[in-house]
């Protein structure tokens, strides 16, 4: 499984370019199968979840080859509309292939997806949207058997602004007859990046980034080339790391607007934050103070994926900070591991109260999920002594090489 060995107490300094976004590239990889041709994706991060998507594409009959940090996908040879259980179980995001396969083949057969155990994340919103477009879906034995002789565009209103359901509905609607209007859609920047990729293939999608998305159904007309947007959650993680450990770091290739709630919280905690163009500079003494309650919410609210790393940054702050998790039920699984390092955190349902302590002590801890694992790394950077973070395969699902990046900033961290 591997582990990170981290010697804490060293300030971070330097400049770093942020990797491509995991939550952008995964739906885009699914979208490549809408067109029987070639897509070139630049700034594509080398991640475990990307590898899982590549295995799915190859199983479907597509070609996918790396050319340095670019991924070339050729879907002309796609012959299969079924994804086996062992591939679906590797990540929750695998369900995003459903809408794209239906649009391309008119049918799909796949099992329920896997991924981090963050509490119930039902895919009923995905299935409801696809059914409204005309898909017939049978559920049983842990599998989904879907058929759609002809998908037809229509008006769809999501009960909550689910990111995955928004993306699945958009992909299926691209292969539908007529116009689809998707209301109460998720507004995350990654959905706008998906729209840009689809536009490059000839799909007519408008409104991504707002609560109403309009899709004119048509088959993609040509090959495409696209650069994946920077990963705002990776950027948030490294900003939290500098805030906790102290130092001065510039992150390049980021859109500061996507980080506004995170940088706002860190500024309130006592960090100096400056944004210029496509870069964000953060300075921290490592001596932070508590902030107003942090409530996770769909974009443009505070991202649930950044909750754990911000919590880790505030473990040694003066005073108490309240966190309210409104997206996932089990998003505090990292808390028990942080307590092993000396953190003072009390959890009641969806509320966690972080009372700042004078010092953290390095300890043996275990990553239980992707973002919680990143939080353990952030905490270890500001702890005294050595920490060992095990089960790092969770972290590698979303961070191309977190140890390499942090070493570039002066951290003492190695994988073994």
Image (cartoon, rainbow, N blue to C red):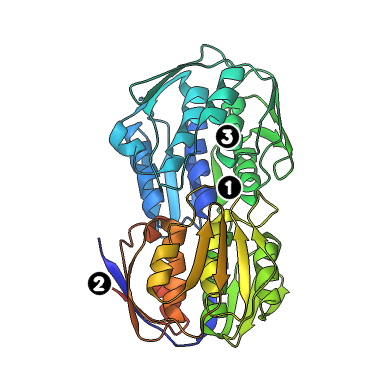
Which circle marks residue 327 in the picture?
1
Q: Position of residue 3 (x, y in %)?
A: 29, 68
In three-dimensional space, the C-alpha distance between marks 1 and 2, rounded to whole angstroms, equals 34 Å
| Nearer to the camera, 40 or 404 | 404
Which circle marks residue 240 in the picture?
none
* Quadrant location, the N terminus: bottom left
Q: Position of residue 209 (x, y in %)?
A: 71, 45
| Nearer to the camera, 71 or 107 | 107
Residue 81 visible, this angle: no
In three-dimensional space, the C-alpha distance between marks 3 and 1, rounded to whole angstroms, equals 15 Å
Determine the secondary structure under disc 2: loop
Q: Name the residue located 36 percent from the left edge and 80 percent from the top edge.
A: 362
Circles 3 and 1, Cβ within 8 Å, touching? The answer is no
Circles 1 and 2, Cβ within 8 Å, touching? The answer is no
Identify the mark nearer the N-term, 1 or 2.
Answer: 1
Q: Name the residue located 33 percent from the left edge and 62 percent from the top edge.
A: 392
Quarter of the image for residue 232 reads bottom right
Q: Name the residue located 69 percent from the left edge and 54 percent from the top edge.
A: 301
Which circle marks residue 165 in the picture?
3
| Nearer to the camera, 283 or 47 | 283
Question: Viewer-nearest of labels 1 and 2?
Answer: 1
Task: Give neighbour class at mark 2: few <14, some 14-19, many 20+ (Cα, 10 Å).
Answer: few
């Amino acid at each position: 499984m591997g582990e990170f060995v981290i010697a804490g107490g060293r300030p971070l300094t330097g400049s770093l370019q942020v990797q491509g976004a995991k939550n952008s590239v995964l739906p885009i990889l699914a979208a490549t199968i809408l067109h029987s041709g070639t897509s070139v994706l630049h700034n594509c991060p080398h991640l475990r979840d990307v590898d899982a998507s590549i295995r799915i594409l190859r199983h479907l009959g597509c070609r996918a080859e790396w050319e340095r940090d670019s991924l070339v996908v050729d879907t002309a040879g796609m012959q299969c509309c079924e994804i086996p259980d062992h591939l679906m179980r590797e990540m929750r995001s695998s369900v995003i292939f459903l809408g794209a396969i239906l649009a391309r083949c008119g049918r799909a057969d796949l099992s329920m997806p896997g991924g981090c155990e963050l509490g119930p994340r039902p895919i009923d919103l995905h299935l409801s949207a696809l059914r409204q477009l005309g898909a017939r879906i049978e559920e049983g034995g842990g599998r989904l058997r879907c058929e759609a002789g002809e998908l037809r565009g229509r008006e769809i209103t999501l009960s909550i602004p689910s990111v995955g359901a928004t993306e699945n509905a958009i992909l299926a609607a691209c292969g539908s007859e007529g116009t689809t209007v998707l209301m109460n859609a998720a507004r995350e920047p990654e959905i706008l990046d998906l729209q840009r990729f689809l536009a490059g293939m000839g799909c007519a999608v408008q409104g991504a980034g707002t609560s109403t998305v309009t899709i004119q159904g048509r088959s993609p007309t040509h090959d495409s080339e696209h650069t994946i947007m920077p990963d705002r959650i990776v950027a948030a993680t490294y900003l939290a790391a500098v805030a906790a450990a102290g130092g001065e770091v510039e992150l390049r290739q980021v859109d500061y607007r996507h980080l506004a709630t995170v940088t706002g919280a860190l500024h309130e905690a006592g960090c100096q934050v400056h944004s210029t163009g496509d870069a964000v500079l953060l300075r921290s003494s490592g001596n932070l103070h508590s902030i107003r309650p942090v409530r996770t919410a769909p974009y443009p609210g505070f991202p649930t994926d950044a909750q754990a790393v911000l919590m880790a940054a505030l473990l040694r702050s003066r005073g108490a900070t309240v966190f309210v998790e409104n997206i996932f039920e089990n998003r505090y699984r990292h808390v028990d591991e942080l307590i092993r390092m000396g953190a003072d955190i009390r959890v009641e349902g969806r509320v966690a109260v972080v009372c700042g302590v004078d010092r953290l002590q390095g300890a043996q801890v275990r990553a239980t999920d992707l973002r919680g694992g990143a939080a353990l790394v952030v905490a270890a950077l500001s702890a005294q002594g050595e920490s060992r973070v095990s089960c790092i395969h969770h972290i590698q699902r979303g961070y191309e090489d977190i140890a390499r990046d942090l070493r570039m900033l002066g951290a003492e961290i190695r994988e073994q």
